[in-house]
Image (spheres, rainbow, N blue to C red):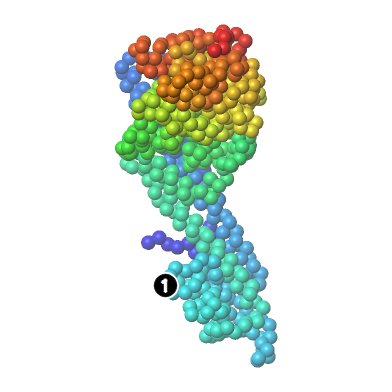
Amino acid sequence: MTSVLTWQQLRDLTLTELDDAADGWAAVARRADAAGTQVDGDMAGTLSKSQESESAKSAVGRLKRLSGNFDYLRTECGLIRSAVNGLSQELAAPKRRLGAALDDAGANSYTVNEDGSVAYPSGGKNAMTGGANPGGTAFGNNGMLAPPGASNGGLYGPGLGTPGPYGPGLGGGPTLTPGGGQPIKGVYEPNPHQARAQEIADSIAHALREAREIDGRYQKALGELKAAPGLTVDAKTWADMAADAGTVRSAARTYLLDEVPLDKPAAARESWWAGLSQEQREEYLAVYPDVIGNLDGIPSVVRDEANRENLQLLIAKLEGQGDEKSQSQLGGLKEIDRQLQEGSRPPMMLLGIGDEGNGRAIVSYGNPDTSKNVSAYVPGLGTALDSDFAKNDLKRARDTAIGAQKYDESSASIVWLGYDAPQLPDNDNLLHSGAVMSPERAEKGAPDYNSFMSGLATTNEKGDPHLTAIGHSYGSRTVGAASQLDGGIPGADDIILIGSPGVGVDRAEDMGVGKENVYVGAAENDPVSKLPSKEEAIAYPLSGFVPGGAILREVSDLGDDDLWFGKDPASEAFGAQRFVVDDGPRPIIDGEGATPAHSNYFNPEKDHVSANNIAKIVAGQPETISVERHR
């Protein structure tokens, strides 16, 4: 049976011993981290670069498993460290309150009894007897209501089963025990020591109640931090670790999460993180990798570290779920993990990951904090966290980074899936899909995109980086919505709109960067960039059934420059710079599906001229792009 914390134990508790224990677990976690880094870099990395035999590949595989073991060890030790540290930090307040009460009792020559009650001496003058009022004992009120049927009938005292100041059936009047005699109901006790003794007893009871709650919470958390026997770290092991992290989170919420500036702008978050000690940072990474990894304003290397760990937790979580959405997201997560393990050039960084909605993933090629040029591409129609996204959309960002680095090595490119893009309807009829044809998803995602862009501008070490916002397909509508929020897109110098069905803005000059810095790519055979306007969509079906149908169609779009979400970005009326792209395969006719040209803009193999123009803009050399006349 677990013993209950007493006030004597709380008094005698040496918090520095808990701090020392936490530091010990932290040291183990750091050693595990260093060992894992050495295995990854000096051993597995070197071997994979110098040897290509099957035995070498097998050895690399074993080394990666060893690295995974060190990663697990680091994480578990970090959780234990956070739990012990949290216990020490939270016990400090009730310990101080108890110490002050004991000092007060000593200063007044009161006696604190074993059960926490306070005995006070006689004092004052009894008007009835002419002698001094007898002393007594004050029992603490800890402020908690007793459960129904409790023997004390009202409030817990400092010890289990100890009567509180309000006895059962006494109508709330004070229960006094003058001179150790029987309680006297409802009689005012004028002893001047009684009120002060009661305050001290209440303080002791309150401190003890608070300390017991804290002790019980962390005792439960530490009791559940148990590793399974053996050396295999698999999905089940990570699932257990995810549960462990949840337990520590629950215990340490007040100690850790409440201090995170979740509702503050990116600059305030950067300042908060910079003001933390290394030990505090390690704790947040151990307990809240999902929060830190997805927090705009946190340095990219830190987000990458946190999200790589959170990626394993998400994989473990979804492994045990059989629904279609979970399995689809699991496929995307595993593909991202595979690419991270394999490594890439430019280096791949995971700046965000999550399973909410259709899934979240933010991946950068190149370090956006150390690069002079940074782009953030918003994908659109049909995009979700799945294996297709992990293969195709990540490749678009990587191709852009590789292309931009040919013109300026200090370039990084990001794919930002930080919102729920509309999904393709089962029948592929875009005009009959409410989500696809509504601006709601774009307008909901726009604030999050701007928050991310603000974070890029804040954490970049160049001071004033060249930032490019890129929107493809429905993603261009999201970028358009972001440009209309207060202040526009934070830090953006250029905007690229590709395969756009309209951006909700009718003039490039209204996008906040100057019309000369808005660039548009629209393939001749891309049907998404030619979606009819809402008026045309209504007029076309009617035109075949009413006299003068051709005139009705023309009147519905005078100038033929309106799309579903507003003015055609490739039109002269919009006013952006249109760059050359390949016409692309024709829908259906060329045997590549309904929208093959819509997917080729970033691909240097299928549309070199478009990919090259995008790369030049991202690298800060837009004056070298090849320009095409407006529609």
* Residue at 63% from the left image edge and 29% from the top image edge: 488
Q: Quadrant of the N terminus?
A: bottom left
Q: Quadrant of the C terminus?
A: top right
Image height of 231 relative to 469, above or below: below
The residue wearing badge 1 is 149
| Residue 344 seen by the camera | no
- Percent position (x, y) of residue 342? 40, 22
Q: Nearer the viewer, residue 468 or 192?
A: 468
Classify residue 543 by image quadrant: top left
Q: Nearer the viewer, residue 298 or 16?
A: 298
Image height of 280 relative to 538, above or below: below
Which residue is farthest bottom? 129
Amino acid beneath label 1: Gly
- Percent position (x, y) of residue 435? 44, 32
Direction from residue 218 to residue 457 in the image, left or right: right
- Percent position (x, y) of residue 192? 67, 78
